[in-house]
Image: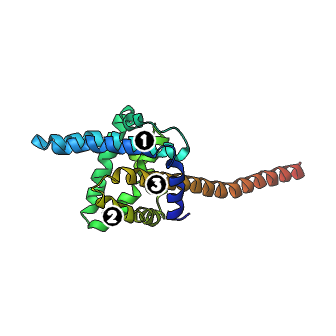
Amino acid sequence: MKAKDFRKSAYAKIKKKCWGTLACVELIVSVILGICAGLNRFYIGWVGSLLLGGALTYGQNYASLSATDGNTVKVDNTFIGFKHFGSSLVLNILISIFTALWSLLLIVPGIIMSLAYSMSYFILIDNPELAPNEARKQSIKLMKGYKWKLFCLRFSYIGWYLLSILTLGILFFWVNPYRRTAEAEFYRNLVAKKDETATTVAEPAAIAAEAEVVDTTATETEEA
C-alpha cells in the first residue's frame, strides 16, 4: 500500500463517524500542553509537559487506533492513558531521551530514529502488559525497512499543514487526527504483513519437521 491508500482508508473511516470527536481530543491535548508550556516559572511547565505528555499521547493514539479498528471513539479516550500512567510516562521519557541523543549526531539520525520509535504507543496499546522499553524495541523491529514509507506518508500531508497555517492553526485540530489515523492504518497493515511473513516462514519448517517424524517412524518400522 502507498501513502495515498492509507490516507484514503483513514479518511473513509473518520469523515462521517468520528472526525469531530478526534478533533476534540486534539484540542483538549493542545490546551493542556499549551497551559503547561505557559508555566515557565521554576520549570513547572517543562515538568508538567513531561509528566502529562505520555498519557495524553497514549490517549490520542488510542482514539486513532479505535477509529481504524471501527470501534467507538469518545472524547473520554483523551484521558485513557492515565490508566496506564506509569508505562506511558516511562515510554515518553525513553523516546525523548533516545531521540535527543540520536539528534546530537545530526538532525537526520534523530529523524530516522523518531520514525523507528513511531509505533511504540500503538504497540503498548495493543499490549498493555508490555514493558515500555520493550515496546520501543519492538517498534524498532517492526519499522525495519519501512521507515521511508512512513516518512513519505507523513510528508504527503505537507499540503494540509500549509493550509492549516493559512487558517491560523485551526485546521491543525483536524489534520493531526487525520494523519494519526492514517499512521494507525499503517501500523495495522505492517503488523498484518509481519504476521503473514512469520506464518509463511513457519509453514515450511513445520512441514519439514513433520516429514522428519514420518521418516524416523518409517525407519524404526523397517528395523523392527
Q: Quadrant of residue 157?
A: bottom left
Whole-Å distance between the Cαs marked 2 and 1? Answer: 23 Å
Vertical arrangement, residue 181 with respect to residue 126, above or below: below
N-term-proximal mark, 2 vs 1: 1
Whole-Å distance between the Cαs marked 2 and 3? Answer: 20 Å
* Residue 21 numbered tag: 1
Q: Are marks 2 and 3 in contact (CB under 8 Å)?
A: no
Q: Are marks 1 and 3 in contact (CB under 8 Å)?
A: no
N-term-proximal mark, 2 vs 3: 2
Q: Residue furthest top?
A: 83
What kind of residue is marked 2?
Leu
**Does the image show residue 132?**
no
Q: Secondary structure at mark 2?
A: helix
Q: On the picture, is 4 further left or further right than 93?
A: right
Q: Are marks 2 and 1 in contact (CB under 8 Å)?
A: no
* Residue 183 numbered tag: 3
Q: Secondary structure at mark 1?
A: helix
Q: Position of residue 90 (x, y in %)?
A: 32, 42
What kind of residue is marked 3?
Glu
Identify which residue is drawn at 16% across, 44% down: 38
Give the labeled residue for mark 2. 162
Where does the N terminus fall, quadrant-wise?
bottom right
What kind of residue is marked 1?
Thr
- Mark 2 or mark 3: which is in front? 2
Q: Quadrant of residue 27?
A: top left
Count of numbered circles in the view? 3
Q: Position of residue 8 (x, y in %)?
A: 53, 58
